[in-house]
Image (cartoon, coloured by chain):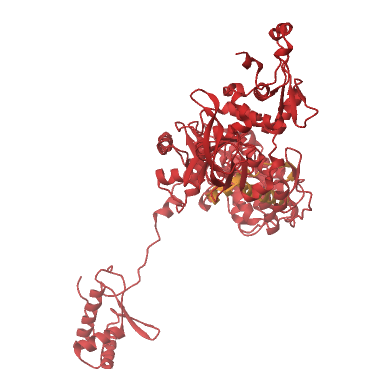
Amino acid sequence: MDAKSIIYGETSIQALLKWLRVVGEPRDVRIVVQRYLELLRQHVLEGNE
Amino acid sequence: MSEPSFNGSADQQALAAEIFRLMTMQGTLFAADSPIRQTLANLADFFAVQRQRDRETVVQEIDIALKANAQIFAREEHEGDVIYITSRQGAYAPRQEDISHNFRQRLHDPDQPLPVDDISVVVSTSRPALTTVEPVFISDYWQIQAGLSPVETATLQPTPEDMTVEHVKAPADLSIGQEDIREPTTVVEPVTEIASTEEPPAAVEEALEAMAEALLDTGAATPKTAPIAPEVVEEVEIVEAALVDAQIPAAELTAAEAISESIPEAEPAPIPTTETASVIEIPVEPEIDFAQTVEAPPAEPIEAKPAPIQIPAGEITFELPDGTEIDLAQPVEALLDEHGAVLEQILLDRLEKDPLRRIVSFGRDLYPEGGLINLGKNDLRRIRDYIVERNEPLLDTEIIADLYYHNPRHGDYEGFRFSLNYRLHREKDFEFVGVEGARLWSAKGLPPIGTKRVKAGEMGQLAGYLVEGYDDSPETQDIVAIRENGSVTRFLSFFEWQTGILPLDAGLAALIPAPMLAEQRSAVLRFESPQHYTSFLAEARYPTGSRGGWLQGLDEFFLEHLVAGALVTIARTDQPNIFTISYDETEGVEDRLLVLDEKKNKLAFANITYYCMADEDLVPSQRKYGRLKNLKSLPMSERRKAEMILEHVFSAMGKQTGTRSAPSYWLSLDELMMGYNVLRPASRSYLLSLIEATPEFQPDESTPAAYFYTPEPTEEEGEGEEDEDEADRFIGYGKYDDYDE
């Protein structure tokens, strides 16, 4: 996907939710943001491939 | 079952008969024609022992006897071992299954088949339980009966032009009517091309192709059967769709997979439930327009999968709502270091506004809403009752352990803990009064902490000077050192000592944990006195808007062990919500100090012996600050009026420098500070700002840090001015009216 179309806080939230479910425990927002940025990057790169 | 007759000599017959009995006994539960196997070695071992004879001789005798009865004992040799096979019915013969006639075959190839135009007889019209996409098998028989001879020889070689995306395109609409049937080429033609692309299943494909054409012809010729015909067309398409995957060369297949992956979650279209019951309802993927998805010219062949694209930095940049650009090419750690706070806040805000509330938060923790453990009204009542019973705010871990017997060893402990906090946070009967690391919950019904003399609203206004920029503590205290060392030392004013309330200035705020939740208004802390082995609760009220913060609940400790002007130290402990409070002990000092007579609500001096280190300049003793007695113990609602208190302190404590008709008062700033802080808290800079803002206060040019207060003469005072005599002038302290009495 085009990175320009990312809406921070909305794009890939489902994937973030899935990750949180798998983790099974509450996570600090710092860690969640870190994971979210990784997901966004992955999303963009896969989209471009 | 009768025993068979045996051949050979009498001994051989007897031996064969005995072996037969042994073996049938061995297989007594076998089917009559099942093989019963036994080795020659086993038989020889048995008879050699039984008959007490040489084993080799027995082997020879058995072998000869059974060879003589070969019609009953079949002989096999396997890896050097001789095996005899018989059965309960006498001789073993492999079972022969008669499959010349069976029901399956007769059902499939009936003797008197129905007319082929009624295809619904052949293909099920019922909806499958699971809507899976699968080809429908039409037997060769029916294809032959329909006049469709399977083509076994013709195989069309695909050309590059045949392998276009357009040819893979499925029809967009399944509900094909008669119009669609009369234009068969639009649907069937591409199918034919795909079906004939490559390799063996050509016979089936062409049969299907021919069948489809024939059926279409039939449909066109006999309008009555028109609704049936499209079903066949769809069936053919489905078969073709299945065949596409199997026959497209590798490169094209990879491209096709890429195409399908690019289509997010393409699910089978809902099956239309039309009145035409004969419609074959087999789900396909009609809405996927491959040509549109790829946006390639129809005539161009599909290209092989390209190599992964290397994206240079800067091309994966997106913007935050505030315009900040986030370059995903940078390491995540670097992004967090630079924009961490903004990214966290925006994410929390977005999640908060998510209408589905998929991810919920409590403090800095995030958790999926679907994983929350449900706590009902009964749970909430139990928790509230327990908090009230314990008579103080409780930690979430205490509640969980005491009421739910959960402990951190449970796998769902953290999830349960989050659920409890999240749920209580949404209830109005509970208030979060914890800090990061100690999540305390208060409940409606708990007694308030601290003095009742000062209401929260009033105290917020009294401490408002701190948020207005008149906090002197950064100048007098090392805030960084307080934060690092975890302790703060300060002198108590009379107001602080009397009420047990410490304004939350920068020094104290550096020590007290920040609020954990955005809307949190207070935190309950425990103070321990190592000198007296006591502990008590105090409440930190955080500043909001124009109201300052403060720490309350220290009144009992202050009144019991300290005096105004005492030096007190507050320090952190390992627990984020527990602090120690201490002071330097001294020999007893007896003095006459200012106290509040609560019965009369008046300030007075009383003899007090204290044992703590104190600053003599700040201790309100009668010998040094005797005029403090003139101050009125005004109600707190009055004390909110800063200017009025300033005038009152000047007129009560100031030296009279005017006349009764033209009163004027002089007071040093130190005395003003002392007097003012008897009635309400204030900093030196705040008092100076008040003085500067009021024209009635003028600095004494001859004495630094001293001021005159000249109130505007009232009308009554003006009238009496005429009668004033110079002899009436005298130097004194306090209000002139006081001397009239």
Question: Camera-side residue: A26 or B545?
Answer: B545
Question: Camera-side residue: B663 or B55?
Answer: B663
Q: Is residue B280 visible?
A: no
The residue sitting at the front extreme is: B727
> Which colour denotes chain B?
red
The residue sitting at the right extreme is: B701
Please state, as top left, top right, bottom left or bottom right, where the N terminus of chain B lies in the image: bottom left
In the rendered image, which quarter is residue B720 located in? top right
* Residue A25 shown left or right of residue B251 in the figure: left
Q: Position of residue B312 (x, y in %)?
A: 79, 53
Question: Camera-side residue: B182 or B641?
Answer: B641
Q: Position of residue B679 (x, y in %)?
A: 61, 27
* Residue B88 shown left or right of residue B659 in the figure: left
Q: Is residue B695 visible?
A: yes
Q: Position of residue B244 (x, y in %)?
A: 64, 52
Residue in the picture at 27% in, 69% down:
B32
What is the count of numbered marks?
A: 0
* Residue B739 shown left or right of residue B116 in the figure: right
Please state, as top left, top right, bottom left or bottom right, where the C terminus of chain B lies in the image: top right
Q: Position of residue B62 (x, y in %)?
A: 26, 87
Question: Camera-side residue: B398 or B513?
Answer: B513
Q: Is residue B691 above or below residue B23?
A: above
In the rendered image, which quarter is residue B295 located in? top right
> Which colour denotes chain A?
orange
In the rendered image, which quarter is residue B37 located in? bottom left
Residue in the picture at 29% in, 75% down:
B91
